[in-house]
Image (cartoon, grey):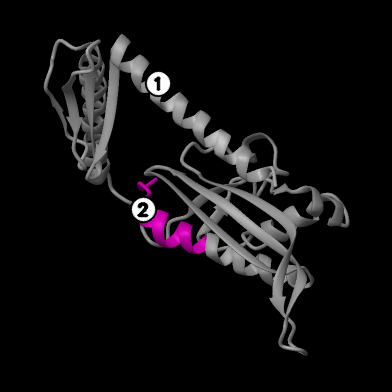
């Protein structure tokens, strides 16, 4: 029975605060932002509550300054100039990069495969430390194109693999969670224990980031890991590979 009065009191209190805020804003001056049609307009409010349009940004990101002497307008102009410089620099880099010869289809792609991050459930379920990491790793070893940067990690001296700054980075995560599935015998939904493989794939040249994931019943974790590795390989070969510069 107390819920409705308490809710009403909260609404009255919130409304009072909102009115007080508007009153203070009108008395002391300030700024007001209005979002319109995917863009926004910023107004200055003087002590009498009069609004003056300072600047506006349309839905394409273009800024129009209406009061160049206003401090907020000056800040926005500076931010806009910096953004334009960054955009121009990026466009120039992409233009230069497009002129660089690209790797041939049969040239190797070097991949830095990080050890997987396991959630608490997966850590407890792992039979011995490193089993999950090896499960993922062996799907890449021996690939005709994809070469792990630590594939010959046991070598030393002149034969030791060198650190490559152009390697594609693959950062896997593996988790074990309850999920709902369909019981084949009954045809009804039931809880199952599912394993999920995820990866963030990062290319430095050209700069790009991709994410993939694959899930399945924990008892079929080997099959799930194979499907997961296949997804990772497709991203590396099909999306990143064609743009990698020639060695």
Q: Residue at x 67, y 61 (%)?
A: 196
In the picture, the quarter occupied by the C terminus is top left
Please state which of residues 2 and 67 is positioned toward the viewer in this rendering.
Answer: 2
Mark 2 = which residue? 103
Quadrant of res 22? top left
Q: Position of residue 21 (x, y in %)?
A: 40, 21
- The relative height of residue 213 versus residue 163 in the rendered view (above or below) is below
Mark 1 = which residue? 21
Q: Is residue 237 magenta?
A: yes
Secondary structure mostly seen in the magenta stretch = helix
Q: Position of residue 32 (x, y in %)?
A: 28, 24
Q: Residue at x 76, y 56 (%)?
A: 132
Distance between the alpha carbons at the discs numbered 1 and 2: 61 Å
Left or right, 52 with reference to 142:
left
How many other residues sit within 10 Å of disc 2, few (<14), some (14-19) or many (≥20)? some
Q: In this rendering, does residue 130 appear at all?
A: no
Please state which of residues 185 and 101 is positioned toward the viewer in this rendering.
Answer: 185
- The relative height of residue 45 versus residue 214 in the rendered view (above or below) is above
SS class of the residue under badge 2? loop
- The relative height of residue 171 versus residue 83 in the rendered view (above or below) is below
SS class of the residue under badge 1? helix
| CB contact under 8 Å: marks 1 and 2 | no
Please state which of residues 243 and 210 is positioned toward the viewer in this rendering.
Answer: 210
Quadrant of res 93? top left
Q: Is residue 104 magenta?
A: no
N-terminal of the pair, mark 1 or mark 2, is 1
Q: Position of residue 130 (x, y in %)?
A: 80, 51
Q: Which residues are magenta?
A: 233-247
Q: Residue at x 74, y 68 (%)?
A: 221
Left or right, 220 with reference to 240:
right
């Amino acid at each position: 029975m107390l819920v409705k009065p308490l809710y009403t009191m909260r609404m009255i209190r919130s409304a009072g605060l909102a009115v007080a805020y508007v009153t203070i804003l009108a008395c002391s001056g300030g700024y007001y932002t209005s979002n319109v049609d995917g863009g926004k307009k910023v107004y200055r409010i003087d002590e009498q509550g009069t609004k003056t349009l300072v600047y506006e940004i349309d839905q394409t990101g273009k800024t129009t300054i209406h009061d160049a002497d206003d401090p907020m307008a000056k800040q926005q102009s500076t931010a806009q100039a910096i953004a334009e410089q960054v955009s121009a620099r990026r466009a120039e880099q992409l233009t230069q990069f497009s002129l660089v010869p690209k790797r041939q289809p049969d040239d190797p792609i070097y991949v830095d495969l990080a050890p997987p991050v396991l959630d608490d459930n997966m850590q407890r379920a792992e039979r011995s430390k490193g089993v999950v990491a090896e499960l993922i790793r062996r799907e890449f070893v021996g690939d005709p194109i994809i070469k792990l940067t630590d594939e010959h990690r046991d070598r030393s001296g002149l034969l030791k693999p060198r650190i490559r700054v152009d390697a594609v980075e693959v950062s896997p995560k593996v988790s074990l969670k309850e999920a709902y599935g369909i019981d084949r015998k009954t045809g009804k939904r039931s809880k199952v224990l599912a394993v999920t493989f995820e990866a963030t794939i990062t290319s430095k040249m050209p700069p790009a980031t991709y994410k993939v994931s694959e899930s399945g019943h924990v008892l079929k974790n080997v099959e799930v890991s194979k499907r997961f590795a296949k997804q990772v390989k497709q991203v590396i070969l099909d999306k990143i590979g064609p743009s990698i510069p020639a060695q």
